[in-house]
Image (cartoon, helix red, strand yellow):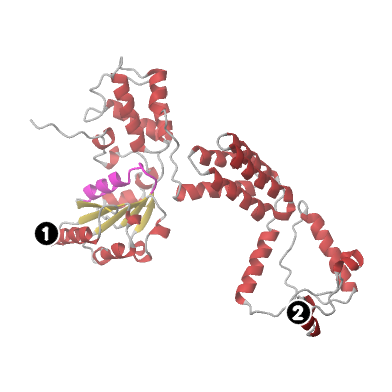
Amino acid sequence: MREQPYQPLAARLRPTSLDEYVGQTHLLARGRPLREALESGQLHSMILWGPPGVGKTTLARLMSSACDARFLAVSAVLSGVKEIRAAVEEAQFYRQNGQRTVLFVDEVHRFNKSQQDAFLPYVEDGTLIFIGATTENPSFELNKALLSRARVYVLRSLSLEELVRLLEAAVRDPRGGLSERDVRFSPVELQALAHAADGDARRALNLLEIAADLAEAGDGTLGEEGLAEVLQGTVRRFDKGGDDFYDQISALHKSVRGSDPDAALYWLSRMLDGGADPYYLARRIIRMAWEDIGLADPRALQIANDAAQTYERLGKPEGELALGQAVIYLAIAAKSNAGYNAYNAARAFVAQDGSRGVPMHLRNAPTKLMKELGHGHAYRYAHDEPHAYAAGESYLPEGMTEPGWYRPVPRGLEIKIGEKLVFLRKLDEAAGKKG
């Protein structure tokens, strides 16, 4: 008898019904719209968006089975327009016999625009029910025509409790699980494996299978040393270029802006733990100092720069301490986006405005001819004026009104800056300058 090819535990235990499926209760619980649509047989085109290992492919298979539809799968990594056309022809053949076809496209974000466009007409005329799976944000990676024809469902990482339940079921399962193997795991060990999987069901089952092999080679138990060996080298799931990456850097930035040092440290630690580039994080920390603190506390800018330089000198892990202390300081520093707003307003104004000439008194006059033409004439040297300020002078192009872009906030050093600007405006008013 021919020996069956090996299948990993995750493949052997793939659910055969929605009731066996673990996770995504926000979509599949009784009474939820997607569950209602499936139970009524009203399957529609959709995008399943979520991190790896949360059951996107399994869910697509279960949905097609629940609606008595044929299931065709193509991978955007391995397939092109030729494979799509072949799938369409197959679907057209079975449609003539009254059978619907689900075309499942794994990693659909890897298809280019022409490949995505190739199956749009057949989605629209009902030849295919399209289900795409992606780990990337569909609004960035998929064209609008496809998005308009498919509903997006967001799949979530599995909770620790769901993963533990999955592992417990795998240990007991007789149809491909571990029930026939002489292995035993304690609740603490299963909890540790689930925690290391970090929301990824496939990863959890892979870790369990490794643990079972190791336990079976001994007395059937894992123990502390065995558990440590299984977990060695496991790192928190982290996509360095995907949405999870940008969501976490966003959370770090917003925690600093929101003056929460503990939250800032948490997100920084999460990113470092997940393998984010510390040099990238250092650059973002410097950006936070300029954008959200600015002149309210110039020390924040210096500390952010010093932290980046410290990391360059010390590297990992010692240099990470400098980054940690930098985000603490930035979180507790006085906040101001006045400079950030002023810069953006000035850039926007210049982008839509014409090229105004430099006033004569502000022009450079390095030659005799330029002086004769009036360059620099009547320029007032501020250091020779009272308070080192040429009251009433204008430094903007002729005809341009004072825009008032920079508005210091009443926090930190900008309190003093604001007071100085009020004082200078009074000098201008006394000199007869019009605002």
Q: Is residue 262 visible?
A: no
Residue positioned 38% across, 65% down in the render: 144
Q: Which residues are magenta?
A: 50-67
x, y percentage for residue 194? 40, 31
Q: How many marks?
A: 2
Closer to us: 72 or 95: 72
Closer to us: 352 or 188: 352
Instruction: Say if the magenta span includes residue 53.
Output: yes
Closer to us: 28 or 334: 334
Amino acid identity at mark 1 = Asn
x, y percentage for residue 384? 90, 68
Q: Which residue is mark 1?
A: 97
x, y percentage for residue 90? 15, 58
Give the SS element for disc 2.
Answer: loop
| Quadrant hosting residue 227 | top left
Q: Quadrant of the C terminus?
A: bottom right
Amino acid identity at mark 2 = Pro
